[in-house]
Image (cartoon, rainbow, N blue to C red):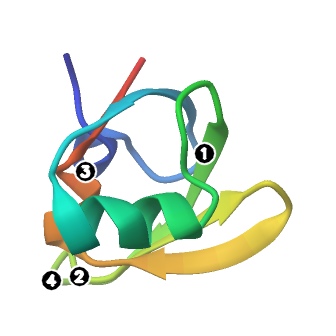
Amino acid sequence: MPTLREIPVGQTATVVKVNGTGAIARRIMDMGITKGVQIHVRRIAPLGDPIEITVRGYELSLRKADAEMIEVK
């Protein structure tokens, strides 16, 4: 299953699962990133960190490590 990190700029993906435990998973879910949510990748920094996304109408930045924990389709 691909992760959010692998989605190209300009594409939209649907969250299938958030991996990770404890504070890391909680931080991702507090951003509104939960199963079934659409995420649009707006921009990726030249070195791949951070990844700028749009979720539920909000523009957010995610660290590369966090993006690798989000399985999408």
**Numbered disc in front, either 2 or 4:** 2
> Does the CB distance between marks 2 and 4 fall below 8 Å?
yes
Instruction: Give neighbour class at mark 3: few <14, some 14-19, many 20+ (Cα, 10 Å).
Output: many
Amino acid at dot 2: Asp
Residue type for callout 4: Leu
Q: Disc 4, disc 3: CB below 8 Å?
A: no
Q: Is residue 19 left or right of residue 58?
A: left
Q: Residues within 10 Å of mark 1 (few under 14, many from 20)?
A: many
Report how far apart the C-alphas of labels 2 and 1 lie in the structure. Answer: 17 Å
Q: For the C terminus, which image quadrant?
A: top left
Label 4 neighbour load within 10 Å: few <14, some 14-19, many 20+ = few
Q: Which mark sits nearer the N-terminus, 3 or 2?
A: 3
Q: Return the disc, 1 or 3, that comes first in the chain's sequence.
A: 3
Distance from the alpha carbon under mark 1 to that under mark 4: 21 Å
- The residue lying toward the viewer, choosing from 57 and 49, is 57
Residue under the point 36% across and 40% down: 7
Image point (28%, 57%), residue name: 67
The amino acid on which the numbered mark 1 sits, given as a three-letter code, is: Ile
| Spatial separation of the CA atoms under disc 4 and disc 3 | 12 Å
Identity of the residue drawn at 17% across and 51% down: 68
Residue identifier under label 2: 49
The residue beneath circle 1 is: 39
Image position, residue 35 (x, y; %): 53, 29
Check disc 4 and report the residue beneath it. Answer: 47
Q: What residue would you read off at disc 3?
A: 5
Above or below, 26 against 2 in this view is below
Q: Quadrant of the N terminus?
A: top left
SS for callout 2: loop
Q: Are marks 2 and 1 in contact (CB under 8 Å)?
A: no
In the rendered image, residue 41, in percent from the top left (x then y), is placed at: 54, 55
Q: Position of residue 66 (x, y in %)?
A: 24, 65
Q: Nearer the viewer, residue 52 or 67?
A: 67
